[in-house]
Amino acid sequence: MIRTLRDLLIGIAVAALLSSVIRSPYLLDVAAYAAVLAIFVLGVSVTFGQLGYVSFGHAAFLGLGAYTVGILVAQHGWNYWVAVPLGILPGLLLGGLVGIVSARLSGAYFAIATLVVAEILVLLVVNWVDLTRGPMGLMVTATPLPFAQSVGWNPQQGYLFAVIAALAIAFVLLRNLRGSATGRSWTAIREAPALAESLGIATVRSRVLNIAVSGSLAALAGALLIPKVFVLSPSLLGVSYSATGILGVILGGKATLVGPVLGGALFAIIPEGLRFLGDLNFAAFALMLLLAVRLLPGGLVGWLADRPSFVRWRASRVGHASEDPQPAPLAVRQHREGVVLEVAGVSRHFKGLKAVQDVSFDVRAGEILGLIGPNGAGKTTLLSMLSGFLPVSGGAIRVRGQGIAGQPAHRVARLGVVRSFQQTALCAAQTVKANMAIASHLHRPQGFWGALLRAPGWRARERDRMAHALGCLAEVGLLARRDDVAGSLPYGEQKLLGVAMALAAQPELLLLDEPAAGLNQVEATRLAEVLRGLRDKGMTLIVVDHNLKMLMSFVDRVVVLHHGVKIADGAPGAVTRMPDVVSAYLGSAPAAPLEELAA
Ligand SMILES: Nc1ncnc2c1ncn2[C@@H]1O[C@H](COP(=O)(O)OP(=O)(O)OP(=O)(O)O)[C@@H](O)[C@H]1O
C-alpha cells in the first residue's frame, strides 16, 4: 500500500513537473495526445498482451467513454472534469458484457465479436441524432482544470497534467494487478486454459474481469480525448483507433507495461516528427510500422531487453531484490478419516460410444488408488468427470458427501479435487517459479481490490504464497530449477513440475493421469519416490498409469476398467492375478500376475 501510494505520488509529481516546464502550445498538444494514446494502448494491452486476445473493436470503448462524457457536458451541462470519471463506467460495463457474451469464443471469433460491437455502436451513434448529433458531430467544450489557474498553468498545461496523472495512476494500478493472483490468472488463461481451470482459477470470470478492466481504460482515454478533438464524430469508434491500439501494443512490445505506453505515445509523436514529408507523412509511418513488426518481434521494449548492457543492468537489480522466502513444509489438507470420494453408478457416453458405464467405487482418506485398464478403457474420461472437466451422462460423484457432478472444474478444484494432465500442461514460457506462483492461486487468496491497491498485508500474503509454492517444488525435488524457464526442462522434470503445481493447489484428493508416461526408468523411479512421500504425508491419490510395476509398488488398492466397465476392485496383489484382468490386458488366459508380465 505504501509503495503504491509512493508510486502514485511520484507519477503525479512527474505530471506536475512536465506541465510546468512545457510551455509551447504545440508541444503541450502533442504530449497530451501521446499520454491519451498511451492510456488507450495500455487498455488494449490488458486484453491483447496479458490475456492473449486480439480485439479489432477496442475503439468501441474509446468512443463510448468519449460520447458518455460529451453528452453529459454538451447536453446536460455537466462540468467536464466531474464527468470524466463517469466515462469509465460504460467502458467497464460494456467490457463485462463483451466478456460474458464472448465467454466461449476464442481467437478470431473474439476479434470479430469486438468488431461487431464497435460497428453496432457506430450505427447507434450515427442514427441517434437527438443524443449524439449523428454524423454532424457533437461539439463539446471542456472547461479548464479547476485549480490549473491558481498554480499558474494555462488550460493546456492543466489538461496535460490531468492526462499524465491519469496515465501514471493507470500504470501503477495495472502494475499491481499484473503482480497479483489476478494478473497471474490472466497469464495462465493465455498460456494453458485447461491448466488454469484445474488449479481453481475461474477462467470465465477472470476473462470477464480482464476485458472490463481493458474497456475501462480505453473509455478513460476516450473521455480524456475530448479537449484534444473538441468535436466527437462516429469515426472515433472506427477501425482507425482500434488499429492504433493493436499496432501500439505490437510496436512497444507486450511483455511489459512500459511497451504499450511507449507504443501509444509514439503513435502521437512519430507522425508529428514526419511532418516534413508532407503528404507522404502517413505512408512513411506505415512503412516504419511494417518494418518494426517484421524486425522487432518483441516490440521496442523486447528489443531493448535483449541488449547485453540492459541484461547486465537487470541482473544487477535482481541481485538487490529481496531473497525468496524459505520453502514452507508441504501442507496436506488436514487429514480426516472416512470416505473422501464416492463414485456411484457414473457413466459417460459420447454419442453411441459408452466410454464409462455404471462405475462405482469409494476412495478413503489417505488411500492411494491405482486406476488401470488397457488403452481406451475409459480411465481419462473417468478422471475428467471426477475433476469437473466432463459432465457425467449418469450417476453421482460426491466429495466429502457433496455432489460435484455438473460443477465447473475450478469449483471442483476449490473443493479439493485437483488433477494433472496426461500431456504436460505448463505455462512453458514462464519460469518454474512463476508457474508455481500461478498454481498457488488458492493459497491465501486476495480479492481484486486488495490486489489493485496492495492493501495492508499484501506483501506478507505474497511471501507466504511463494513459501508455499517453493515448498511444493521442494517436495518433487525441483527447487534448484526454480529460475529456469519451464519449457526448457527435460520432459521428466516437466511432469514432476505438473505434480508440484497440482500440489500447490492444496488438493485433498490428487488425480494423476499417467504421470510416468514418457519417463525413462530413472525418472519413473524418482516419480514413484515422490508419490510414496505424498502417501506418507497422508495425501489421498488416484493414479492412472500404464507402468504397472511402478504403480503396484505404492498403491493401496486398484480399480480396473475394461471397455468402460469396472471389472475388478481390490488389493494390488489380488487384482493382478484375476483372470479377467490379465485377459483384458493380454486378450488371452493368464500365465502370470500382471505386473510381472508388464515388468
Ligand atoms: N471427447 C471424446 N469424444 C468421443 N470419444 C471419446 C472422447 N474422449 C474419449 N473418447 C473415447 O472414449 C473411450 C475411452 O477413452 P479414454 O481416453 O478415457 O481411455 P483411456 O483408458 O484413458 O485410454 P488411454 O490409456 O489410451 O489413455 C475411447 O474409445 C475414446 O476414443
Image: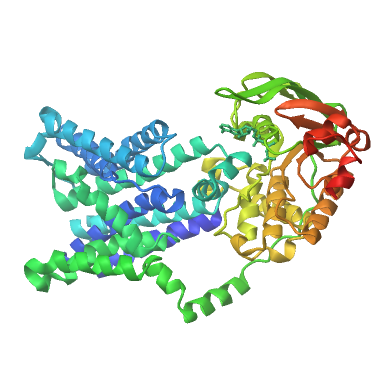
- Do we see residue 478 in this rendering? yes
5, above or below 572, in the image: below
**Where in the figure is residue 118, as x and y percent of width and height?**
25, 39
Question: For residue 521, what is the image quadrant?
Answer: bottom right
Question: For residue 592, what is the image quadrant?
Answer: top right
On screen, residue 12 versus residue 125, left or right, reads right
* Nearest to the observer: residue 569 or residue 582: 582
On screen, residue 585 versus residue 501, left or right, reads right
* Nearest to the observer: residue 147 or residue 105: 105
**Where in the figure is residue 548, as x and y percent of width and height?**
82, 45
Counting labels gives 0
Taking the image in four quarters, ligand 1 sits in the one at: top right
On screen, residue 378 versus residue 536, left or right, reads left
Q: Residue at x 17, y 53 (%)?
A: 228
227, above or below 284, in the image: above
* Nearest to the observer: residue 212 or residue 352: 352
**Where in the figure is residue 193, as x and y percent of width and height?**
53, 44
Q: Residue at x 88, y 31 (%)?
A: 579
